[in-house]
Image: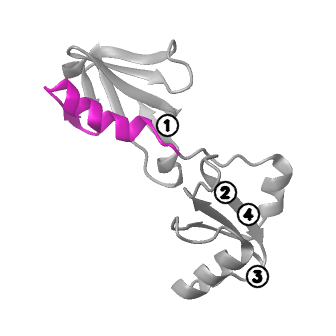
Amino acid sequence: MGYTITTIDGELREYAFDFGGVIALRNFTAETNGNRLIIKSAANANFSILDALVNEVEIDGIVYDNAEEAQAALQKLVFNPNPPVLLKPNELDELGNNIVKVINIPDSVEFTKQGLADYINMVGLSVGANEIVFFKSNYQPYGYGTQNVKIIGEL
């Protein structure tokens, strides 16, 4: 077998994939050219990490015969429209021994402190004084992409 691309288990699953034993961020796109699969950088189309025949690529344990089916499976592994959350060293220190939660918020929830507090109460979640919560939403009021808000302490 030529190339193996698999899903990563655990916390990195949303942001990375395994490409033959190398961890790669999910900021690539999958394309086809005839019977070839191509994985290109989403930011730079001139940079690719794979250009191979479809039957040379194992995707999550499956070798496909059809390039379009392989492309659809591969795209789910190599691309994530949500940007990773990057923390500066002082922000990482701030986390310390605190409990960290990541809560995905539906697009219908108002992305304000009060709107988030109302949502947390509605679904029965609790946020304590020593907890740090990251809220994620695809709500785009001004067309600027995914919002991430960090709230420390009780709401």
In the image, taking residue 64 as reference, residue 99 lies left or right, namely right
- Image quadrant containing the C terminus: bottom right
Q: Which residues are the magenta region? A: 60-81
In the image, taking residue 23 as reference, residue 147 lies left or right, namely right
Query: What's under tag 3, amino acid-wise?
Result: Glu
Determine whether 74 is above or below 53 in the image. Answer: below
Between disc 2 and disc 3, the foreground one is: 2
Name the residue carrying label 3: 154
Query: What's under tag 1, amino acid-wise?
Result: Arg
Name the residue carrying label 4: 150
**Near-viewer residue (1 or 87):** 87
| Location of residue 133 (image quadrant) | bottom right
Tag 4: Cα neighbours inside 10 Å, few (<14), some, or many (≥20)? few
Q: Residue visible at 32% across and 34% down?
A: 74
Marks 4 and 2, Cα distance to the nearest angstrom?
Answer: 7 Å
Query: What's under tag 2, amino acid-wise?
Result: Asn
In the image, taking residue 45 as reference, residue 6 lies left or right, namely left
Question: At numbered mark 2, what does the secondary structure look like: helix, strand or loop?
Answer: strand
Name the residue carrying label 2: 148
Q: Residue visible at 27% across and 24% down?
A: 57
- Earlier along the polypeptide chain: callout 1 or callout 3? 1
Residue 26, disc: 1
